């Protein structure tokens, strides 16, 4: 009997975890548009470019014209962004959680046009500044 309860609780915990991960994936792709290099570059002409990586990585290499907003102070940095202009986000290709968190914060603050560079700076083909 106790084994059945433990098994049941384990299955419920797994289902809750999978539902949470599914929601996070849905939210990232519902509130933001993931775009390839060319579309991202076109949006850069009218948008606000934000690098979400840590300051050390930003100084080493970043897309020309980007501002570095550390995710730990992202909410405090929103005042530097205009709500009526598109916000273009990028990070490294391995940092999905940071992008997801930034998307949720922007959406909650009322930003409507959010674009994310698919695969991050690791596969960026445009101009960069290296330090």
Image (cartoon, rainbow, N blue to C red):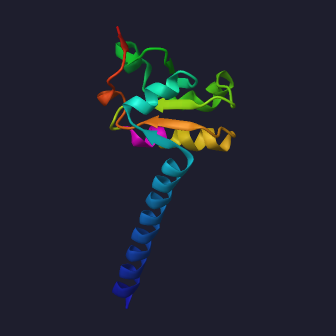
Looking at the image, which residue is at 43% across and 71% down?
Answer: 15
Tell me the quarter of the picture where residue 6 sits. bottom left
Residue 39: image location, x then y, percent: 44, 32
Secondary structure mainly formed by the magenta segment: helix
Could you tell me residue 131's position as x and y percent?
Answer: 34, 8
Say which residue appears at 38% left-offset and 36% top-offset: 36
95 horizontally vs 27: left or right: left
Residue 91 appears anywhere in the view: no
What span is colored magenta in the figure? 95-99
Residue 56 falls within the magenta-colored stretch: no
| Quadrant showing the N terminus | bottom left
Instruction: Say if 96 sits above or below 58 in the image.
Output: below
| Front in this rendered view, residue 33 or 77 | 33
Look at 38% across and 38% down and name the residue there. Answer: 118
Residue 47 placement (x, y as % from top left)? 57, 25
Closer-to-camera residue (63/79): 63
The image quarter in which residue 105 lies: top right
Q: Is residue 87 above or below residue 130?
A: below
Question: In the image shown, does 9 or 99 lie closer to the viewer?
Answer: 99
In the image, residue 50 sits, relative to residue 98, either above or below, namely above
Q: Residue at x 45, y 60 (%)?
A: 22
Decide if residue 83 is on the left or right side of residue 18.
Answer: right
Tell whether 107 sits left or right of 99: right
Quadrant in the rendering for residue 61: top left
């Amino acid at each position: 009997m106790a084994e059945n309860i433990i098994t049941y609780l384990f299955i419920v915990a797994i289902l809750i975890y999978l539902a949470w991960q599914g929601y996070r994936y849905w939210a990232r792709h519902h509130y933001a548009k993931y775009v390839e290099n060319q579309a991202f570059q076109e949006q850069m002409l009218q948008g606000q470019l934000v690098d979400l990586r840590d300051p050390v990585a930003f100084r080493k290499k970043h897309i020309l014209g980007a501002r570095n907003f550390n995710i730990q102070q992202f909410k405090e940095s929103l005042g530097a962004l205009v709500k009526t202009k598109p916000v273009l986000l990028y990070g490294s290709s391995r940092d999905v959680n940071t992008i997801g968190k930034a998307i949720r914060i922007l959406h909650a603050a009322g930003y409507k046009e959010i674009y994310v560079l698919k695969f991050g700076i690791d596969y960026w083909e445009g101009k960069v500044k290296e330090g």
